Image (cartoon, helix red, strand yellow):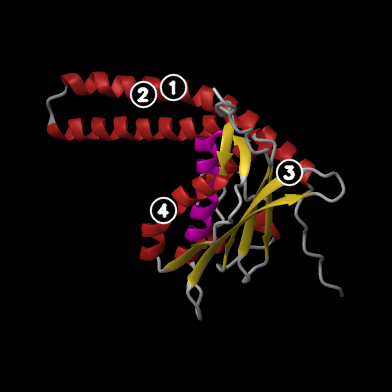
Amino acid sequence: MSEAAEPSAPPADLEAAKLAALAEFAAGAGHEINNPVAVISGRAQLLLAGETDPERRRELVTIHRQALRIREMISDLMHFARPARPRFDLVDLREVLAGLLERQAARARAARVELAWQPPSDPLLVQADRNQLAIALAAVVENALDALEAHPPADTAGRVTLTSAAAIDPGTGARSVRIDVTDNGPGFGPDIRRHLFDPYFSGRSAGRGIGLGLSKCWRIVELHGGVLEVASEEGKGATLSLILPASESPAPAGPD
């Protein structure tokens, strides 16, 4: 009897449609959940103002804090579902990546993970919202660090390597900028791959925790007219790639 074929990743257009449907669901559910949570939070505050019993005060404080936590989670969901429109400007991705690596350096050292990037000599120019791209790139790097912290390699040091380059499609002549984030963590199979960008999906076997990081990354890249690609095999690490339309260098300013 032949072995069952391993399921493959869904086509890109089908995955995009699935994630768009999830975004619509998140927007509707977030709105409906937020209303009763606001009532619970407000009622807890009102009762707390007139409560003198220490034990009941502690319980009301707990209720209020947990209600606020739910509202924060809903806020994240709404950001995934209906993110702010990007404020486009000419951005050199070398500057964004340099800032990102500086912010992640302490975490990488604590986890004994080598975080490496060799900046190219030429600019990597895109029309983009600098803050949103910083969030998207941070989500990918943090995802790699999550995997290596949960499952450090047995016979070598953990490593996250960023590579960046501009490219030209030989068929269409379209110019793009590609950022690859590669880790030597446990990787993941098709079962995790097909859900990787789902909100709050937990790929625990691959050290990829619950959250909205990669979901937000996918939304931001989509809003910038780009593509987010994934390549991985179980036990052989993973590469997540952000591919964005390149922009021309600004024209030099003329004489006054």
Residue wearing tag 3: 15
Residue wearing tag 1: 36
At mark 1, the secondary structure is: helix
> Where residue 212 sits in the image (x, y, percent)?
53, 43
> Where residue 96 sits in the image (x, y, percent)?
50, 45
Residue wearing tag 4: 102
- Look at discs 1 and 3 and give the one toward the viewer: 3
Instruction: State which tag comes first along the sequence, 1 or 3.
Output: 3
Structural distance between the alpha carbons of marks 4 and 1: 41 Å
> Where residue 29 sits in the image (x, y, percent)?
56, 27
Q: Amino acid at mark 1?
A: Pro
> Where residue 199 sits in the image (x, y, percent)?
57, 42
Is residue 43 placed above or below 144 in the rendered structure? Answer: above
- Residues rendered magenta in the picture: 129-146
Which one is in front, 239 or 129?
129
Q: Which mark is residue 40?
A: 2
